Amino acid sequence: MVLKNTSEAIRKEKLGGCGIGGGNTFPVAIPDENGAFVMSTRLELDPGASVGYHKHAGTEEVYFIMTGKGLYTEEGEECPAVPGDVFLCREGRSHGILNTGEEKLVLGAAITKSAV
């Protein structure tokens, strides 16, 4: 199945609950409600912007860092985020990401239903 991101950016001034700053999202419509995937998007976080720290209940999320640099936090532990990094937040854990660079932090994000 081929799924394409929307071609037009959707501007959001707050991403992920307590996130700060804004960014663009390019969501992918996932037509199969019975599949594992709940959401997928490309995010472009403005400098200083973040996806707020949030907990996953019944879902898991993966981030694929494409360009820029940031700071990923999971369960209070911080890790620099650079292109090529992949971060996986399992069900029941909390995470967020902050753009620490001077350019957009571009990442792919996908949320799946928890296998548990």
Image (spheres, grey):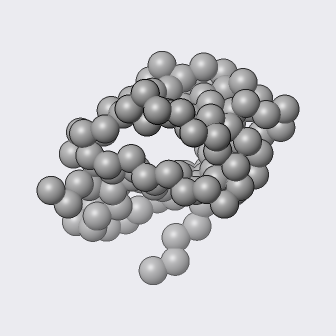
Taking the spot 21% from the left edge, 45% from the top edge, the residue there is 58
What is the x, y in percent for residue 29? Answer: 46, 59
- The reply, left or right, for residue 51 in relation to residue 65 is left
Taking the spot 24% from the left edge, 39% from the top edge, the residue there is 92
**Residue 16 can be seen, yes or no:** no
Residue 7: which quarter of the image? bottom right
What is the x, y in percent for residue 65? Answer: 64, 53
- The reply, left or right, for residue 79 in relation to residue 100 is left
Which quadrant of the figure contains the C terminus? bottom left
Give whichever of 80, 49 is nearer the camera.
Answer: 80
Vertical relation: 86 (above or below) 13:
below
Which quadrant of the figure contains the N terminus? bottom left
**Residue 36 can be seen, yes or no:** yes
- The reply, left or right, for residue 32 in relation to residue 99 is left
The residue positioned farthest toward the left in the image shown? 116
What is the x, y in percent for residue 60? Answer: 33, 50
Taking the spot 52% from the left edge, 70% from the top edge, the residue there is 3
Vertical relation: 7 (above or below) 55:
below
